Image (cartoon, grey):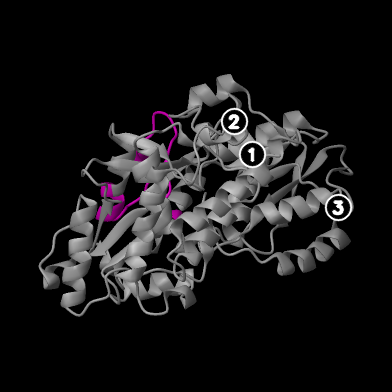
C-alpha cells in the first residue's frame, strides 16, 4: 500500500487529542489475562472501516488471547500521525503502511524473521533496509505508468510512444487535434511530481540503479548534468503547454475524475490508478511505461508491504503472529488488488488464487512486474535502502511544483542537494 494523499498535519494534531483521550497506553492486559495491542490503520475509499474490521477479526482469531485495539489515522498521512503518537508516548504496537526508514534509525521497529520472509514472498529483500525486513513485502506498485485514452489517441491518429521524442510528438498532435495531452493533479504535491519522478527514475536510475546509494555516498549530485537533463523534461512539458490549464489547482481526486471523463488523453500516475478505472471504461484505457530517450523499457518500481511491528511492544510473539497472519490472508490482498491496483508478491500465488477479475490495463501493467526487464527504484517512493532521507521526498515534490513557475531547473535541483545535506547531517 503506497498510495499517498496530501498531508493534513493540522487535522492530525487535532485528532491526536481524541486518541490521547481514549488510549492512555499502547498495550494493556485484558481481564481474561490476554494481551491487548494497538494497531494503527487508515481509511481510504477502498480500505473501508468494514475491511479493517473483518481483516483484523480474521487475523486476531488466529492468535489466542490477543485483542487488537484499532487506532485510525485522521488522514492517509500515516507517518506524520505515527510520529505524533510516538512523541506522545503512544507509539502503536503495529503500524500499517508506514515508511520504515523514518523509524529504523531510532530503533523503533522490530525486523521480521528472515526465514519467514524468504518462505513467503517473491522479492524477500524488495523493501529491506540494511538487509533487514520491517514490513512484509506483500505487494508492489509501478510509479509512474502513463495511462492513455484509446479513443482520444485514435482521434489524433497517434500510437503509444516508446521514446521521449515520440512522446513530445504525440503531445503536439493531441494539441493540434484540440485535446489536452496530459492530466495532472498538480495541487497535490505527490501527483504534481509524477512526470519528474518518471523522468529521473527512467533516465538517471535506469542507467545507474545505484544512483541513490551513490547520492548517500556524496559521489553524485542532483545538479549533475544527467539529472538536470531529466528534470528539464518536466519543465519542457510545462512550457509546451502539455498539461491542462491551471494544473497546479487541480486536486489528485479531481484529476482522476477528469481523466476518466476523457478531458485529457494521458495520465501519468502510480499503478494504484488501476483501481480507479470504472469498469465501463476497462477497454478504453491503455498503458505504457514512461518513455526513455532510446526507447528502452525502464520500470520505476516500489515494493510495499503490510504492517510494521514496534520494537517496544511488550508481546512480540503475539504481535508477530497477528502481523504474519494478516499479511498472508488472500482476502486482504484481494482488496488491495482490486481497489488499490496493488500487484501481489506472495510466493506460489497467481491472480486466480485471489479470486479477482481485473481490467486489461491491470493485466498489461502486471506483466511489467512479472517479466524480466530493467526495474529500478522509483525515486521518492522506495521503501528500502533507496528511500530518501528525512523530508527529501516532500522537497522533491515541491521542486516539481516549482518547475511550473521557474525556468531555473538547476537552481531547484541545487536546493535538493542542500536539503539532502541538511537531512543527512
Q: Residue furthest left?
A: 157
Look at the image and tell me whether residue 3 can be seen.
no
Mark nearer the N terminus (3 vs 2): 3
In this view, the residue in front, 381 or 425, is 425
Give the Cα distance between marks 2 and 1. 7 Å
Q: Secondary structure at mark 1?
A: helix
Q: Nearer the viewer, mark 1 or mark 3?
A: 1
Mark nearer the N terminus (2 vs 1): 1
Highlighted magenta segment, given as a residue range: 340-364
Q: Which residue is mark 2?
A: 129
Residue 344 in magenta? yes
Residue 248: x %, y % from top left: 47, 73
Q: Which residue is mark 3?
A: 88
Look at the image and tell me whether residue 356 can be seen.
yes
Give the Cα distance between marks 1 and 3. 20 Å
Residues at discs 2 and 1 in contact (Cβ within 8 Å): yes
Q: Which residue is mark 1?
A: 101
Residue at the spot 70% in from the left edge and 55% down from the top edge? 80
Q: Secondary structure at mark 3?
A: loop
Amino acid at each position: 500500500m503506497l498510495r499517498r494523499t496530501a498531508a493534513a498535519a493540522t487535522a492530525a494534531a487535532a485528532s491526536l487529542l481524541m486518541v490521547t483521550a481514549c488510549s492512555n497506553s499502547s498495550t494493556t492486559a485484558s481481564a481474561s489475562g490476554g494481551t491487548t495491542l494497538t494497531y494503527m490503520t487508515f481509511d481510504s475509499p477502498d480500505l473501508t472501516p468494514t475491511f479493517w474490521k473483518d481483516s483484523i477479526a480474521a487475523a486476531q482469531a488466529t492468535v489466542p488471547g490477543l485483542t487488537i485495539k484499532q487506532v485510525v489515522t485522521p488522514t492517509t498521512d500515516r507517518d506524520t500521525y505515527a510520529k505524533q503518537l510516538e512523541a506522545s508516548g503512544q507509539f502503536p504496537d503495529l503500524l500499517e503502511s508506514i515508511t520504515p526508514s523514518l523509524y529504523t534509525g531510532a530503533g523503533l521497529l522490530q525486523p521480521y524473521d528472515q526465514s519467514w520472509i524468504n518462505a513467503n514472498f517473491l522479492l524477500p529483500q524488495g523493501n529491506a533496509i540494511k538487509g533487514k525486513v520491517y514490513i512484509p513485502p506483500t505487494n508492489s506498485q509501478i510509479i509512474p505508468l502513463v495511462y492513455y485514452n484509446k479513443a482520444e489517441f485514435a482521434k489524433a491518429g497517434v500510437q503509444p510512444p516508446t521514446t521521449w521524442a515520440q512522446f513530445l510528438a504525440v503531445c503536439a498532435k493531441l494539441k493540434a487535434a484540440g485535446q489536452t495531452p496530459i492530466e495532472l493533479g498538480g495541487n497535490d504535491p505527490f501527483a504534481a511530481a509524477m512526470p519528474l519522478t518518471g523522468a529521473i527514475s527512467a533516465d538517471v536510475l535506469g542507467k545507474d540503479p545505484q544512483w541513490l546509494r551513490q547520492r548517500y555516498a556524496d559521489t553524485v549530485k542532483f545538479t549533475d548534468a544527467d539529472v538536470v537533463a531529466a528534470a528539464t523534461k518536466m519543465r519542457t512539458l510545462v512550457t509546451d503547454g502539455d498539461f491542462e490549464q491551471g494544473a497546479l489547482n487541480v486536486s489528485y481526486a479531481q484529476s482522476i475524475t477528469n481523466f476518466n471523463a476523457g478531458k485529457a488523453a494521458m495520465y501519468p500516475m502510480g499503478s494504484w490508478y488501476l483501481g480507479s478505472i470504472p469498469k465501463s471504461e476497462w477497454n478504453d484505457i491503455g498503458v505504457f511505461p514512461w518513455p526513455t530517450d532510446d526507447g528502452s523499457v525502464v520500470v520505476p518500481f516500489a515494493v510495499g508491504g503490510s504492517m510494521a511491528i514496534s520494537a517496544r511492544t511488550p508481546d512480540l510473539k503475539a504481535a508477530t503472529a497477528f502481523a504474519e497472519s494478516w499479511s498472508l490472508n488472500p482476502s486482504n490482498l484481494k482488496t488491495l488488488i482490486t481497489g488499490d491496483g496493488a500487484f501481489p508478491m506472495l510466493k506460489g500465488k497467481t491472480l486466480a488464487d485471489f479470486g479477482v477479475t481485473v481490467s486489461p490495463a491491470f493485466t498489461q501493467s502486471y506483466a511489467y512486474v512479472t517479466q524480466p526487464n530493467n526495474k529500478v527504484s522509483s525515486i521518492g517512493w522506495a521503501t528500502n535502502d533507496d528511500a530518501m532521507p528525512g523530508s527529501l521526498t516532500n522537497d522533491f515534490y515541491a521542486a516539481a511544483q516549482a518547475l511550473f513557475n521557474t525556468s531555473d531547473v538547476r537552481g531547484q535541483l541545487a536546493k535538493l542537494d542542500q536539503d539532502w545535506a541538511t537531512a543527512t547531517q
